[in-house]
Amino acid sequence: MDTHQIIKVCGMRDADNIRAVEQLGVDYMGFIFWPKSKRYVSEPPVYLPTRCKRVGVFVNALPDDILRLVNAYLLDAVQLHGQESPHYIECLRKKLLQCGDVPPLLIKAFNIATPDDLDLTREYDTLVDYFLFDTKGKQAGGNGTQFDWSVLEHYHGQTPFFLSGGIGPDDAERILAFHHPQFRGIDLNSRFETAPGLKDINKLRNFLNYE
């Protein structure tokens, strides 16, 4: 894969699996703090990564709850996957300023199916550090299906983005062929799993080593 792109592996919670994924050299590792998720982290894993950034994934959570988990897990980034408003994000960012010299990055996810869905990003542009474009489905995320990436030709915002939604082991060539001035990285999850929250290390390794 293109070493200039950020690689984020989400939905982690098993200590041995976390260690193995970390050793692949990924940049970000995601932990889901939404109780309705199959990959919900109800208690801290025995091991947390030290060589990649830790991302907490939240859905319409109270800012104080996010702040508590940021401090408990020493999160480097907060990903918002619900209907969080711009005002909510401004309030949350102020709270996160309490988290030391370098507050966590903010990532706002949007579920995409058509160009019209991109209209929602306009009022959030520059409010967060990254957008994450996922597939519109029944769940807030982790649906395991892809949207039509050509829709992103209609995205003209200033906020860089992650590409997410059903990216699997056979998509390496498509990722390498995808170009957009604000494209910064990919988010990998369900299609690299042997079970919810457990990643297939060989599939990930082969994908990341694809040239």
Image: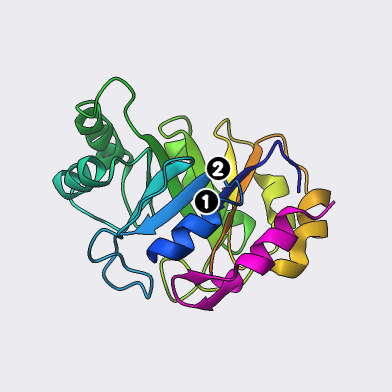
* Disc 1 secondary structure class: helix
Residues at marks 1 and 2, CA–CA distance in whole angstroms: 8 Å
Please tell me whether residue 207 is drawn above or below residue 76 in the rendered image: below
- Is residue 167 something one can see in this rendering? no
Magenta segment: 190-211
Residue that mark 2 sits on: 27
As drawn, the label of residue 109 is: none
- Tell me if mark 1 has few (under 14), some (14-19) or many (20+) residues whose alpha carbon lies within 10 angstroms of its own: many
- Quarter assignment of residue 68: top left
Residue that mark 1 sits on: 22
Please tell me whether residue 192 is drawn above or below residue 33 in the rendered image: below
Assess whether residue 204 is covered by the magenta stretch.
yes
Q: Residue at x 85, y 51 (%)?
A: 211
Nearest to viewer (mark 1 / mark 2):
1
How far across and down, in percent of the image, does residue 109 sit? 46, 52
Please tell me whether residue 33 is drawn above or below residue 62 in the rendered image: below
Assess whether residue 128 is covered by the magenta stretch.
no
Closer to us: 200 or 76: 200
How far across and down, in percent of the image, does residue 141 sit? 45, 66
Q: Is residue 56 left or right of residue 202?
A: left
How far across and down, in percent of the image, does residue 193 sit? 55, 74
The three-letter code of the residue at mark 1 reads Glu
The three-letter code of the residue at mark 2 reads Asp
Residue farthest toward the bottom in the current orientation of the protein: 195
Check whether the beta carbons of the residues at disc 1 and disc 2 lie within 8 A of each other. Answer: no
Q: Residue at x 51, y 73 (%)?
A: 143
Label whose residue precedes the other's in the sequence (1 or 2): 1
Q: Residue at x 42, y 35 (%)?
A: 128
* Disc 2 secondary structure class: loop
- Is residue 185 something one can see in this rendering? yes
- Quarter assignment of residue 76: top left
